[in-house]
Each structure stands twice: as C-alpha cells, then as structure tokens.
Image (cartoon, rainbow, N blue to C red):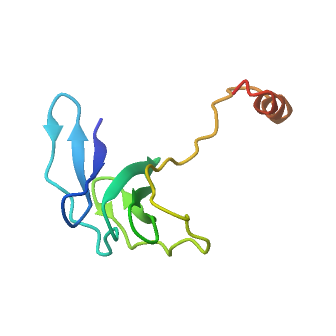
C-alpha cells in the first residue's frame, strides 16, 4: 500500500517537501512544491488522514494548511485562521477521535470525561 511522507525544514524555501512512499521500496519522485509556501522555517508537519496537510512555522501566520490529494500532492492553500497563533509554531497535530468500536456515544463521553481515552 503506498503512502505519502512530508518533511518540514528550515534551510531554504520551500520549507516543506513531500514524497510518495512505498514500504519496502522507499521514496518516489518529490511532489511539486505548494503554490503558496509556508512563510518561514518549517517546525512540524502533519496529515489529516488523506485530505489535508498542515505545517507549523516560525513566522506569521505560524501555521499553513492545504488540501492534500494522495499521489497528486498539494492543493490551493486554505485561508489563514481568523485568530492566529501568538508565536512560533513548533508542531502540528490534527486531533484524531479515539476508536471506541461498538461503545455507545454515552459511554464514549463518560470515558473521555474520566480521561480513559
């Protein structure tokens, strides 16, 4: 099964690079850089499933997000957040809801309230 891998970096523009990845084979050809690049040194990168990619960076707006299409790459940059982070972004993480299997919504909320999941 093919995957994608992204790296944020700080030595030079474009501050983020992405590649196809095939286990047991390795890297494919680098995807094209995003049309609108991060504004500064990349500090972290994360995929939201297979639909979006975010990069935290060292200059305003401190986070940049694009749609992502597997095996295609970056889409058009999303608008910056209305309320931006107040300083350098050191990491990015899309929150993923816990897998609760057949648990009811009521049980899930109780487990989350108690910090079990």
Residue 39 at what x, y percent from top left?
34, 71
Q: From the viewer's perspective, is 113 left or right of 80?
A: right
Give the answer, above or below, for where 27 lies relative to 67: above
Q: Which residue is at a point 61% across and 71% down the rendered structure image?
A: 83
Residue 26 quadrant: top left
In the displayed structure, 75 sits above or below 50; it is below
Residue at the spot x=28%, y=49% of the render?
A: 7
Which of these two is toward me, 7 or 104?
A: 7
Query: Where residue 112 sits: x, y (%)?
Result: 76, 32
Left or right of residue 63, residue 15 in this image? left
20 displayed left or right of 59: left
Image-based side of 25 in relation to 23, left or right: left
Position of residue 67 measured from the top left corner of the image (x, y, whole percent): 43, 64
Q: Residue 31 at what x, y percent from top left? A: 21, 59
Numbered label tally:
0
Q: Nearer the viewer, residue 91 or 6?
A: 91
Residue at image x 42%, y 49%?
A: 46
Q: Residue at x 17, y 55 (%)?
A: 30
Work out which quarter of the rendered image holds the C terminus and state it.
top right
Please say if 106 is above or below 18.
Answer: above
Q: Quadrant of the N terminus?
A: top left
| Furthest residue toward front | 87
Residue 81 falls in image quadrant? bottom right
């Amino acid at each position: 099964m093919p995957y994608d891998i992204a790296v944020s970096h700080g030595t030079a523009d474009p501050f983020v690079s992405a590649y196809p990845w095939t286990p047991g084979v390795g890297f494919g050809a680098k995807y094209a850089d995003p049309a609108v690049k991060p504004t500064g040194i990349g500090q972290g990168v994360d995929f939201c499933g297979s639909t979006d990619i975010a990069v935290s960076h060292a200059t305003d707006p401190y986070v940049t997000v694009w749609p992502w299409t597997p095996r295609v790459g970056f889409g058009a940059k999303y608008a910056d957040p209305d309320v931006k982070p107040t300083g350098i972004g050191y990491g990015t993480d899309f929150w993923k809801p816990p897998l609760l299997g057949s648990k009811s919504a009521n049980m899930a909320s109780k487990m989350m309230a108690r910090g079990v999941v």
